[in-house]
Amino acid sequence: MPEVEIMIGGRAFEVACQEGEEHYLRAAAAMLDAEASVLTEQIGRLPEARMLLMAGLMLADKTAGVEDKLKVMQGQVQELEAELGRLRNTPAPEPERVEVPMVPESVTETMAELAARAEALAAEVEEKLGAEG
C-alpha cells in the first residue's frame, strides 16, 4: 500500500492509499487544502484538528449544494426525455395541400397574340397619323 505525502493548510501528512489511487488522493487533498487555505487566511493558524474539521465541513457544504443542483438537473433531464418520447411517438401531421396559382399556357399564348395585335394596330395608327401629318 503506497504512502503519499499531502499538504493541507501548510502541514504535511503521510497517507496510505490503494495502489493506483494516488492521483485521486492528491486531487482530494488539493481540494481540502484549498478550503484550509481560505480558513487560515480568514482566521489565522488553527489547531490541526479544528482546521481539518472546518475545511471538511466547507467541502461537505459545497458537495451538498452540488448534489442539490444535480437532483434538479436529473429531474429536468427526465422531463426532457419524457417530452422527447412523446414527440417521437406522436404521429406525423398529415401533409398540407398547397396550391400555387399558375397561368395556363393557353392563356399565356393568347396574351402574346393580343400583345402582337395591339402592337400591329399601334403601328398602323402611327402610319396613318404620319401620312396625314
Image (cartoon, rainbow, N blue to C red):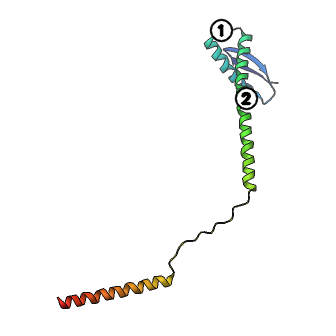
Marks 1,2: beta carbons within 8 A: no
Task: Tell me if 105 is positioned left or right of 13 in this view.
Answer: left
For residue 23, the mark is 2
Q: Please name the residue shown 72% across and 50% down the image.
A: 84
Q: From the viewer's perspective, is residue 59 above or below residue 93?
A: above
Q: In the image, what residue type sits under mark 1?
A: Arg
**Image x and y of residue 22, in percent:** 75, 27
Instruction: Tell me how far mark 1 sits from mark 2, CA to CA.
Output: 28 Å
**Image x and y of residue 119, in percent:** 33, 85
Which of 25 and 67 lies nearest the eye of the viewer? 67
The quadrant of the picture occupied by the C terminus is bottom left
Q: Please name the residue shown 70% across and 25% down the image.
A: 62
Residue 49 appears in the picture as rendered: yes
N-terminal of the pair, mark 1 or mark 2, is 2
**Image x and y of residue 65, in percent:** 70, 27
Which of 55 and 3 lies nearest the eye of the viewer? 55
**Image x and y of residue 122, in percent:** 30, 86
Q: Please name the residue shown 28% across and 90% down the image.
A: 124
Callout 2: 10 Å neighbours few (<14), some, many (20+)?
A: few
SS at badge 2 = helix
Residue 29 appears in the picture as rendered: no
Task: Tell me if 99 is positioned left or right of 111 in this view.
Answer: right
Q: In the image, what residue type sits under mark 2?
A: His
Which of 113 and 89 lies nearest the eye of the viewer? 113
Displayed quadrant of residue 47: top right
Q: Which residue is mark 1?
A: 45
Q: Nearer the viewer, mark 1 or mark 2?
A: 1
| Number of marks | 2
Callout 1: 10 Å neighbours few (<14), some, many (20+)?
A: some
Q: Please name the residue shown 74% across and 25% down the image.
A: 25
Task: Tell me if 92 is positioned left or right of 113 in this view.
Answer: right
